[in-house]
């Protein structure tokens, strides 16, 4: 029996039938697809290193403690690994439509909170695995750790049958309550143990207090509502999804030519995508502010592989009002440098840590109340979310087939109609765009804008006449 952290529990409580809190991805593999029986055996062989995949959530009676993970006494792999095929000819638009439909369905809380859909029938002799796990189980970094644990680093890896597994008996209600009280005492004791270290280093305490205060003030400054725009507002339960891919080498080429970081370049091209989307809807980008929540990992190096959430966040403003691509990038660079100095992420981590001391019943009630309020009166503090996760820069395999691309999916919360997930893998950067089905039918415009944003920056750093990509003239959404 493992107790959830406060942030893990929050992601569980946020889910309300409209905001689906699962993170996901679409992995494209070279063909031909292996037999489904082999795929089941392959998944089964990985279960010993993925303990959460055979555990379910149990709630403490009366909300006296945070939810816990316990072994599923009725675990059935066939429920979680499913098989489907696209109608011929299995184009990119069909795959995107399938992913959107799968992401519109919440995970069953009576079972382990993950699914994997094996998809056959893709063009160019490819197949895919569409996987989803609940956000209470993993954040972006631990999600890539799960992916790395599932896949193989060699095409010659053999399937090793797993040892027999017997679930631990489910705890009784009284045992859950006793564990909750023991956990609360343990959390407080852990914090008390840090007091002697703090007393011995008062200058560090003062410095930490200053940085936290500075971060809280910076967060407060970003809480002002933004002007209304069509990319924020109420959402429904259904999703659209599209993706586009860029070369990591080309992103780094822009970074070298115009300075900054890879993340700066990525945010700059996403800004171009949002500018194009806004203009295509007849809105004036120069009159708007697009504020994005950017998750920031606070996971220590020795915490990789742990299935939980260890993230904070900063709030950045995408400069959609700036038409010049270099000026947009310069604006992003300056803003990200200021945000790093503002200690917003430090303050966010402190606020998350305080959840340890909050009574779980009140924390759950407060979260549900806020979600219900936002459903009636959506916020405009955050217009979108852009999450950027570094993935492995070497090929991964499933049953000897190389994973060619990995396209991420980011969930939407109340008030946010469009989100972008970014993940790098083996020399490629993939942008996965999630849209509310009813209010964002045109997310392909954002994808094309991302393509064009990188193309215009490349044209500026390359010698005249050098070979390279040109602006995208794609007419359809899809995985490019």
Image (cartoon, rainbow, N blue to C red):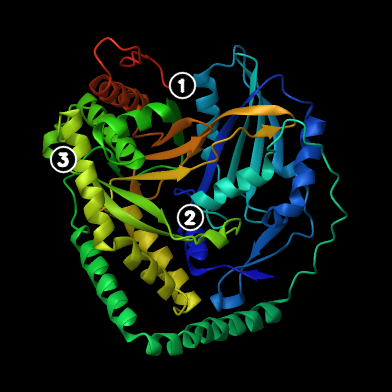
Q: Is residue 355 visible?
A: yes
Q: Which is nearer the eye, 250 or 424?
A: 250
Q: Earlier in the sequence, mark 1 or mark 2?
A: 2
Asked if 412 appears above or below 310 in the picture, the reply is: above
Examine the image and state in which quarter residue 174 appears.
bottom right
Look at the numbered disc 2 and give the secondary structure of its residue.
Answer: loop
Asked if 471 appears above or below 198 in the picture, the reply is: above
Q: Are marks 1 and 2 in contact (CB under 8 Å)?
A: no
Q: Position of residue 183 (x, y in %)?
A: 59, 80
Q: Which mark is residue 288?
A: 3
| Farthest top residue in view | 465
Task: Determine which residue is flagged by label 2.
Answer: 15
At 38% across and 59% down in the image, what residue appears?
372
Q: Position of residue 47 (x, y in %)?
A: 75, 50
Mark 3 Cα within 10 Å, few/some/many (few <14, many 20+)?
some
Q: Quadrant of the N terminus?
A: bottom right
Spatial separation of the CA atoms under disc 1 and disc 2:
31 Å
Spatial separation of the CA atoms under disc 3 and disc 2:
29 Å
At 41% across and 44% down in the image, what residue appears?
388
Look at the numbered disc 1 and give the secondary structure of its residue.
Answer: loop
Q: Are marks 3 and 1 in contact (CB under 8 Å)?
A: no
At 55% across and 75% down in the image, what residue appears?
63
Q: Nearer the viewer, mark 3 or mark 1?
A: 1
Q: Is residue 417 visible?
A: no
Examine the image and state in which quarter residue 247 appears.
top left
Q: Nearer the viewer, mark 1 or mark 2?
A: 1
Q: Nearer the viewer, mark 3 or mark 2?
A: 3
Task: Determine which residue is flagged by label 1.
Answer: 480
Q: Earlier in the sequence, mark 3 or mark 2?
A: 2
């Amino acid at each position: 029996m493992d107790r959830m952290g406060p942030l893990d529990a929050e992601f569980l409580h946020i889910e309300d039938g409209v905001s689906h809190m699962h993170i996901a991805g679409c992995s494209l593999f070279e063909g031909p697809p292996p037999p489904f029986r082999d795929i089941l055996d392959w998944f089964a062989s990985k279960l010993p290193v993925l303990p959460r995949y055979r555990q379910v959530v149990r709630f403490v009676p009366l909300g006296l403690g945070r939810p816990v993970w316990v072994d599923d006494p009725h675990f059935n792999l066939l429920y979680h690994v499913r098989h489907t095929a696209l109608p011929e000819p299995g184009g990119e638009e069909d795959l995107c439509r399938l992913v959107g439909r799968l992401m519109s369905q919440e995970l069953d809380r009576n079972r382990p909170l993950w699914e994997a859909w094996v998809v056959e029938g893709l063009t160019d002799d490819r197949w895919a695995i569409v996987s989803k796990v609940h956000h209470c189980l993993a954040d972006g970094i631990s999600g890539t750790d799960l992916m790395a644990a599932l896949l193989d680093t060699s095409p010659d890896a053999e399937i090793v049958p797993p040892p027999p597994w017997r679930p631990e008996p489910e705890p009784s209600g009284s045992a859950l309550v006793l564990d909750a009280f023991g956990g609360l005492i343990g959390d407080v004791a852990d914090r008390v143990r840090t007091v002697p270290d703090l007393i011995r280093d008062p200058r560090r305490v003062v410095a930490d207090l200053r940085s936290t205060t500075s971060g809280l003030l910076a967060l407060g400054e970003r809480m002002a509502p933004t002007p209304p725009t069509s990319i924020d507002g109420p959402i429904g339960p259904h999703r659209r999804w599209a993706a586009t891919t860029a070369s990591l080498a080309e992103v780094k080429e822009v970074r070298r030519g115009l300075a900054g970081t890879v993340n700066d370049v990525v945010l700059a091209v996403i800004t171009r995508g949002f500018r194009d989307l806004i203009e295509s809807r007849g809105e004036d980008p120069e009159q708007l502010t697009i504020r994005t929540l950017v998750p920031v990992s606070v996971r220590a190096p020795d915490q990789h592989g742990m299935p939980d959430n260890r993230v904070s966040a900063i709030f950045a403003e995408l400069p959609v009002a700036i038409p010049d691509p270099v000026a947009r990038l310069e604006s992003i660079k300056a803003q990200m440098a200021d945000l790093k100095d503002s200690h917003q992420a430090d303050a966010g981590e402190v606020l998350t840590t305080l959840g340890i001391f909050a009574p779980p019943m009140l924390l759950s009630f407060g979260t549900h109340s806020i979600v219900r309020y936002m459903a009636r009166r959506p916020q405009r503090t955050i217009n979108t979310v852009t999450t950027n996760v570094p993935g492995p820069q070497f090929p991964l395999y499933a049953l000897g087939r190389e994973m060619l691309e990995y396209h991420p999916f980011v969930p939407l919360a109340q008030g946010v109609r469009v989100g972008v997930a970014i993940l790098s893998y083996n020399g490629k950067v993939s942008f996965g765009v999630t849209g509310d089905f009813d209010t964002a039918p045109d997310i392909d415009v954002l994808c094309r804008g991302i393509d064009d944003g990188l193309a215009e920056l490349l044209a500026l750093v390359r010698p005249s006449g050098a070979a390279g990509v040109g602006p995208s003239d794609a007419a359809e959404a899809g995985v490019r």
